[in-house]
Amino acid sequence: MTDITVRSEQVCFGGTQGFYSHESEACGGSMNFALYQPPQVRNSGKLPLVTFLSGLTCTDENFTTKAGAQRVAAELGVMVLAPDTSPRGAGYPGEDDSYDFGTGAGFYLDATESPWSDRYRMYSYITRELPALIAERFPADMSRQGIMGHSMGGHGALTIHLKNPDTYRSVSAFSPICAPMQCPWGEKAFTGYLGGDRETWRPYDATELVKSKASGAGILIDQGAEDDFLKEQLLPEVFVEACKQAGQAVELRMQPGYDHSYYFIQTFMEDHLRHHAATLLA
Amino acid sequence: MTDITVRSEQVCFGGTQGFYSHESEACGGSMNFALYQPPQVRNSGKLPLVTFLSGLTCTDENFTTKAGAQRVAAELGVMVLAPDTSPRGAGYPGEDDSYDFGTGAGFYLDATESPWSDRYRMYSYITRELPALIAERFPADMSRQGIMGHSMGGHGALTIHLKNPDTYRSVSAFSPICAPMQCPWGEKAFTGYLGGDRETWRPYDATELVKSKASGAGILIDQGAEDDFLKEQLLPEVFVEACKQAGQAVELRMQPGYDHSYYFIQTFMEDHLRHHAATLLA
């Protein structure tokens, strides 16, 4: 069995909120993740798994402490996985210079530019290495997986679902970066990780991906109408327009008054987990 | 009107989670607090107010980000106030030397020992100055107040209720310090803030207080059975025995598997707010 280190395990809503670490091959070093196992693990066999991808600057802890997901997961009988947002401590020049590139900003892609390509391989980590580890060590039913995320993690959830619709059968996002090729965050990250050839960016842009192939799932997106990043960085209407043309089912809910924070996320977390459960527990 | 500074206000479950600061007379300097106003403030006139007192090392932020109270408060139509746990930056010798005395450890009492007596006056702050400010600036119905807290803040909630049962009509606690005169945390704090005469400690010890006078309210206490502090510091059974002899209604729920953390608190937050609402919304 692959080694994992239990950093902590605490009872929460009758289940277990754990924080773990392990040596990652994809990311070339130790990676942290958090996993909530609801009380049903004790008598229901394997349970569905929903992965939450966090946004810029986050670790595995922000979502786990602030989103209020455990209560709903315990009611529904769903496991919830919160990975970290990047490798840590690679030591590359500039790695810690900005909040939107390098540490805490892995963008859920496999970098091709040196030196990032050596360890910044979050796409492989999230879609292959970490699920294999979870399947080996925890009672998760890997045939019933969903994916969601926030901001940079919303970009991750949309792209990973669109590229792997049979694996991640349900998808939702909070204030996702919907068209990274058209916004400053995305352009900076893609240039740094993938280089100057914009053609190589397309497989990591939800709007470009959906143009080439719709998934069978219905996508749920919540977006705060007062989100400071809405107009420059997130561009949900660009994605919705592409979905419309591609025949992709999507529901974009503009939430009046809400911002980009976990006060927004926790408000709609129950809706999102129920959206996933509607597919995964059907 | 008394000046307050809005540090932030964010929409959460349709209401407003605010962080504020103001110049406190009782505490001789700037004090922070957090207040959640549920959506009902817009059309229901004045609403009940539940104050949550936090434990050692906490600020007004721990409860507000981790306890999941806003969802339930929004459903019930209750305001929730989270004060800080001590004055900050008084500059007294030793103020920042330990986690259980000085900064972050005000113990909800009025210190009588120099130099603490000048600014460490959390009892007056919580029971008089802050409520007056809230009543002036927010639509809270001060005739319908409840109080709850965790650990050191559970001690605060129990003692403040028992001394002011007509003001704080409902009370509950998570893993409270129940008999501070009999535990190391209490003995250290009371010696430092109140001096060596143990008689002066009694008004700040829930077990001693209940012996002299029961309140008409029913006290709800949740306690994690795997809490590391249970046997040395918290002593709920000592309090329950004193309640029994005094005719004080108390329900102590030992929760198997739970520890001292906010993963425990969030699990039972809904029960506690409903306990308060049963009195305050009756």
Image (cartoon, coloured by chain):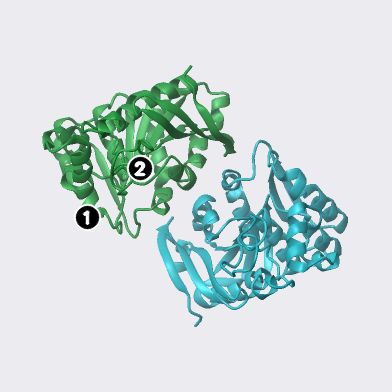
Chain colours: A green, B cyan
Q: Say which residue appears at 25% left-offset and 30% top-offset.
A: A117
Label 2 environment density (alpha carbons within 10 Å; few <14, some 14–19, many ≥20): many
Q: Nearer the viewer, residue A83 or B246?
A: A83
Q: Nearer the viewer, residue A5 or B148?
A: A5
Q: Say which residue appears at 38% left-offset and 38% top-offset.
A: A89
Residue B38 visible from this viewpoint? yes
Which quadrant is home to the C terminus of chain B?
Answer: bottom right
Q: Which residue is mark 1?
A: A231
Q: Say which residue appears at 54% left-offset and 29% top-offset.
A: A40
User: Mark 2 — on which chain does it sit?
Assistant: A
Residue A110 visible from this viewpoint? no
Q: Which mark is residue A104?
A: 2
- Image location of residue B73, percent across then percent down: 53, 57
Furthest-top residue in this view: A1
Q: Nearer the viewer, residue B156 or B247?
A: B156
Query: Image height check: is A56 above or below B92?
Result: above
- Image location of residue B63, percent across then percent down: 55, 55
| In the image: residue A232, left or right of residue A138 | left
**Sequence-wise, which precedes: disc 2 or disc 1?**
2
Q: Nearer the viewer, residue B98 or B282?
A: B98
Q: Mark 2 or 1, which is nearer the eye?
A: 2
The amino acid beneath tag 2 is: Gly
Q: For numbered disc 1, what is the local secondary structure? A: helix
